[in-house]
Every structure is written in C-alpha cells, then in structure tokens.
C-alpha cells in the first residue's frame, strides 16, 4: 500500500472511530494533507502544455501537480463537471491557507531586512505589500486568469479578468506551493521574494 | 569566524554597499535572523532556574535561549537597563511574526482536520481559536506573566496580570519558537496543537 493510501486509510479509520475519542495533539501534526488524486490521467482539465507553461511562469515545479490543479479549479467548474476528481471547495480552502502563508512570508522578509522597524512600521509595510491590488497585479503579470479552470457561467461573466478572483487565485497558488513543498517556509519565501520583488524594493528604498 | 558572525558581517557589508543596488530576491531568503547575543553571560535578567521552569511549562527546549529572553523582555525593561543586550523592539517584533505563525499553524490544523469545511467555516473556526481572550487564557495557564522581564514603572501597574500583555507575550513566544526551530512549521504546529488543545477539541466536537 502506498504511503498516501495508508494516510487516507488511517484518516478513514479515525473518522469511523470518532474524531474526539481519538483526539491527541500529536495526531494533528503527523498528517500531511492528502490530495484526492495525483494520477496524470485525472489532469483532464489542465493540459500538459499549460502545466509546463504556468510552472515556467511561476518559476516553481510542482512535485504533485494535483495541488496546482486544485488551486486553479473554481467551484463553478466542479459543479458542472461529471468527471473531475477535484473537491469543489479545494480552491477556496487553499486560498484560506495561502492567505496566511503569504502574510508570514512577507512578515519574515520584513523582519530580516528591516531590523530597526518596530511592530507598527512592520505592519504598515506588510499591508503595503499584501493587499488585493498588489495580488491582482502580480496574478495578471503571471497570466493566472488564462489558466483558471472555470464553469461556463463564470466564463461568460469575464471571470478571468476579475481582479478579486485573480488575487484569490494567487493566494491559492501560494497555499498549493506551501503543501507541495512539504510546508517549507523558506521555499515559499523564495517564491514570494521573487514575485513581490517590485513592492519589497519600494519598501526597502523607503528605509 | 563563526557562521553567525559571518552572516552578521555579510549583512553589514550589504548595508554599506547600499540596500537597493544589492537587492536580489535570493538575498531575502539566504539569511536567518541573527540575534544580538547567545552567550549565557548575558542572560542576566532571566535566571537559569527560571529558564528551566518555563521551558518545562512550554514543553519546548530552546536551542538558543536568547530568543526566549527576547520574547519575554518588554521595552520598559530595556529602556531602564544599562547592561541588557536585548533590542528594545525585539519583543514586539517577535509578536509581529508570532501573530502570523500562530494563524498559519491553526489554519493548517483546521485544513487537515476539517476536510469538508469551506473557507467561511474555516475562518470562523480560526477566529474562535485565535483571539486575545483564548491567548490570554493560555498565557495565564503557562504563567507567562511571572517570567516577564519588565521595567519598574510597568511592574507597579500590574503588567503581569494584564490580559492584552499576556496575549501579546504568547504571540512573541510563538515567534521565538518559529525562528529557534529554524522556521520549522511542523514543530510550531506541535506546540500550538498541544497548548490550544482545549479550543481545537471544541471545534472538532462541533463538526
């Protein structure tokens, strides 16, 4: 039985046994999130050519591309599709994680580079870097809209140019990189430093 | 020259050469934050007995105890002291990092344990766990107030029982553990899962 299947099996067992009775603090840590499928046969909504291209743009190569697909697949597509194995909430759940990962990554960079700043100054600089406008600008530069996997209804509403959706997608991508890199914050910081360079430079110039 | 001194020296050089001209995204990642001193001779404000006790309470042993001292030393003490080598902003800067680390740690635990929750539900549960009231309660249970290093003025104002100060100190401790563990989020999650167990259990029970 593969490692991933064992983890899935154990989670199923734990659920059957009752979440609370089996609760221990260590059980929260030992697990790494399990994705629904990593088989390339299921990557039917993102062609191999697109995967190569977007990874080149992101300058990050996924160990398990299902994370990338989850980050790019909007609920509207899942609800319309009969074949996708991507969870309908996956994209938004990764956005929830990515939001926190991004804040920590930028906070870490500011902490190291602005040794004289107090908490208030660090907070102001963080807000300058992390907001929907900067996120949407970076997502546009990365052409994330082009690679979004969306339902027909959303497609007709011009979702690929929607600034809030683009910002959310970048957060989901950052969440995906966090888990794909085995929760390696230094690897995430490298990604953030590269793509947020323009804003970080402006902040350092203001010191 | 020790590794830490080399890093310090390189940072000094970079500053002299101009922050912007030498800016590259990789330079933001290669550095691990440098603390002012790790010599036990400088641990004059936190006796060895206290260090042993608090580490036992935290169930975390610091590799470099200066992180612990920085987290516990309030600005009021630094401003009154002529011998401490702790930076006057250190405690608040660690609180800035710890705030983000804690949010990510709880978000990660919820992500793994609540696979059916959407983003809104995850956000609600995160806010239930991470707020000043829960933080102050946990900090009180850990008796952090007793170990705070404060100036005489603050001492007379009953700072050791101040709920907001206790909450902030727990965040600073979490920031200190993050850097002390070489930015190992899994190690931080272990700490958070252990000390936030009561609240996490309540959330899992509500599933």
Image (spheres, coloured by chain):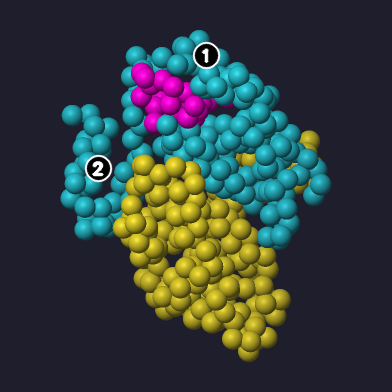
Chain colours: A yellow, B cyan
Hey, which quadrant is residue A194 in on the image? bottom left
Q: Is residue B107 magenta?
A: no
Q: Residue at x 45, y 60 (%)?
A: A129
Displayed quadrant of residue B190: top right
Q: Is residue A143 depicted above or below B168 in this figure?
A: below
Query: Farthest bottom residue?
Result: A156
Q: Which mark is residue B11?
A: 2
Please give left or right for residue B29 compared with residue B164 in the image: left
Q: Is residue A100 left or right of residue B163?
A: left
Where, quadrant-wise, is the N terminus of chain B in this rendering? Answer: top left
Q: Camera-side residue: B87 or A166?
A: B87
Q: Chain of mark 1?
A: B
- Compared across the picture, whether A88 is left or right of B4 comes to right
Q: Is residue B59 above or below residue A193?
A: above
Q: Secondary structure at mark 2?
A: helix
Q: Nearer the viewer, residue B15 or A8?
A: B15
Q: Residue furthest top?
A: B49
Residue A167 x %, y %:
53, 69
Say which mark, if any, is on residue B50: 1
Residue A74 place in picture, x, y as percent: 62, 73
Residue for point 46% across, 73% down: A137
Q: Residues within 10 Å of mark 1 (few under 14, many from 20)?
A: few
Magenta highlight range: B58-87
């Amino acid at each position: 039985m593969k490692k991933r299947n064992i983890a899935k099996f154990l989670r199923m067992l734990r659920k059957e046994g009752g979440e609370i009775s089996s609760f221990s603090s260590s059980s929260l840590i030992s697990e790494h999130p399990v994705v629904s499928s990593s088989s390339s046969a299921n990557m039917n909504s993102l062609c191999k050519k697109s995967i190569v291209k977007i990874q080149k743009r992101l300058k990050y190569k996924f160990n398990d591309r299902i994370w990338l697909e989850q980050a790019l697949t909007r609920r509207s597509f899942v609800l319309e599709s009969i074949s996708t194995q991507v969870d309908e909430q996956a994209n938004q759940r990764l956005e929830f994680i990515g939001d926190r990962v991004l804040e920590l990554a930028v906070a870490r960079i500011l902490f190291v580079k602005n040794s004289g700043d107090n908490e208030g100054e660090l907070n102001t600089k963080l807000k300058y870097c992390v907001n929907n406008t900067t996120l949407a600008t970076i997502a546009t530069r990365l052409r994330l809209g082009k690679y979004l996997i969306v339902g027909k209804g959303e497609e007709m509403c011009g979702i690929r140019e929607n600034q809030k959706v683009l910002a959310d997608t970048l957060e989901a991508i950052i969440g995906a990189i966090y888990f794909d890199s085995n929760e390696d914050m230094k690897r995430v910081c490298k990604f953030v430093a590269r793509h947020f360079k323009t804003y970080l430079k402006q902040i350092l110039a203001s010191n």
